[in-house]
Amino acid sequence: MKSRTALVCLALLAPTTASLAASRPRYGGELRMAHAGPAEVAEPALADTPIEATLLGLLSRPVCHVTPDGDARPALARALSRPVPQAVRVELATPATATALARAWTRLTGADAPSPYRALLYPLRAEGRQVTASGHTLELALAFPWPDLERALCHPALAPLLGTAASGPFTASGKGALAAQLAWPEGRPYLDKLALTATDERGLTRMWTAKQVQVELGAPAESNTQVGPALYATYLAFSPRKLPVDFRQAFESAIDRDDLTRLFVRGPAVPMPHLLPPALLVQPARVRPTAPAPTAARTVTLVYDAALEDQRAVAERIQVKLHDRGYTVALEPQPRAALRSRWARGDFELMLHAVLLPPVPGPALAIVLDTAGRKDLLGVELPALGALPDASARDARARERALALASSVPLLPLYAQGLAARVAPEVMGLTMDPQGLPSLDGAWVLPADGTGASGRP
């Protein structure tokens, strides 16, 4: 009798087959995703809006990713190690992947593809221009102590160019179709397939209402969306040689960042009055200066990214507000590659320049200083930061230096944007990573019966 009672109790406590299946992530299935980005993405250093970086990351990833705890975990790399304190070893799956990665990093500093993301490689000897592969390994020698190198290497702009075998969790399998990459070093994603549709904001709304898609990228930030940290930072760069010494005062007195962000920038977005965005730096209050004394009227040209509708609206607003300060502003949209080329040559008077900052203050400050045209400051600021062995102390010092350097660099911070993802209830496991991008590697789709069972070994 006692034995029979025990068996009945065990039967009541034991999970059913259905409940076990419901708790187990499902391999397989196809996820339908729409986005408000381009139909095709360019090379990593130019595909740096949050949507573009997300789309690129499906096909090509950097060697690692930053975890919520702030550590660097291998992604494309098999392993990251430090055989000696001032050298990092990156082990890749194949010699071809190692060679492709070395070429991609070398391009960042080359004359044909200048990029502010080259600052991430500045601590390397020769600033990353001599990165070479030895078999399936990259040996990275540091010019000075820089404990943040691994975290810097996780930036999406440092991914290999598209076309490298097994460089992302998915591979292209047709127009708008991606298939799970079996050879991905972190292990194949749960999903079998992704179906991508590029559309505009109205198209997103229409497709979502008709239940034609299960995930949307670039949707308005609402209560039912997932939003990552706002790390896509937009600045107004200006040339001190070509503008009056009181230009900064004239601009600051004319522009209200709160109004600019709220009225002219697509959300999710936050005003950014300091060199680092709120996600990296608590924003102390700033007092707007009074307008400088009137001077003779000046005509200046403001160049901006032709692919970004936000920048067009912001440029037009700056045009109106600076007119009240005696500036006639001509607007000149440019393709992103041409914009970056002009930035590298210093061929501009005013330029709206947006960069995707890493979720780490030190490497983020390096990108900002290079974006400001003050690459000389990297040799002063980064070695001092790298001398601090504790990560929290380095992060705090980088924030302090960002506040201290703001008035000495020709760069006016404006706003930072994040990415909102709208996710259907049947999509499980989609998360936003510390870079502010949605991670689809661990996502899966519940079947119509809602069990979540894989039915596969």
Image: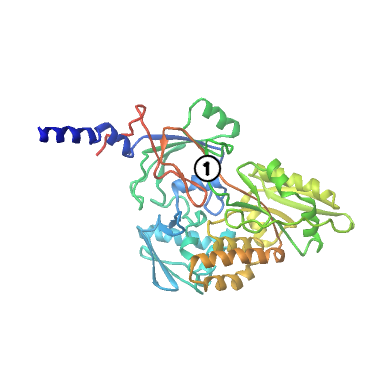
Instruction: Name the image quarter holding residue 316.
Output: top right
Q: Is residue 117 above or below residue 316?
A: below
Q: Is residue 436 visible?
A: yes
| Residue shown at 58% from the left, 65% from the top | 398
Q: How many marks?
A: 1
| Residue shown at 40% from the left, 47% from the top | 169
Q: Residue furthest top?
A: 210
Q: Nearer the viewer, residue 298 or 81?
A: 81
Q: Residue furthest front?
A: 2
Q: Where does the image place residue 1, in percent across and percent down from the top left?
A: 9, 32
Q: Is residue 111 visible?
A: no
Q: Identify the secondary structure beneath mark 1.
A: loop
Relative side of 106 to 450, left or right = right
Neighbor class of circle 1 (other Cα within 10 Å; few <14, some 14-19, many 20+) is: few
Q: Is residue 269 above or below residue 121?
A: above
Relative side of 3 to 50, left or right = left
Relative side of 22 to 397, left or right = left
Amino acid residing under circle 1: Glu
Q: Nearer the viewer, residue 180 or 368?
A: 368
Q: Where does the image place residue 46, in percent across and percent down from the top left?
A: 57, 52
Q: Is residue 417 above or below residue 142?
A: above
Q: Nearer the viewer, residue 7 or 66?
A: 7
Relative side of 255 to 122, left or right = right
| Image quarter hosting the C terminus | top left
Residue under numbered circle 1: 40
Q: Is residue 186 above or below residue 447?
A: below
Q: How is the image coloured?
A: rainbow
Q: Where does the image place residue 188, in percent across and percent down from the top left?
A: 34, 46
Q: Where does the image place residue 94, in percent across and percent down from the top left?
A: 35, 58
| Residue shown at 33% from the left, 46% from the top | 182
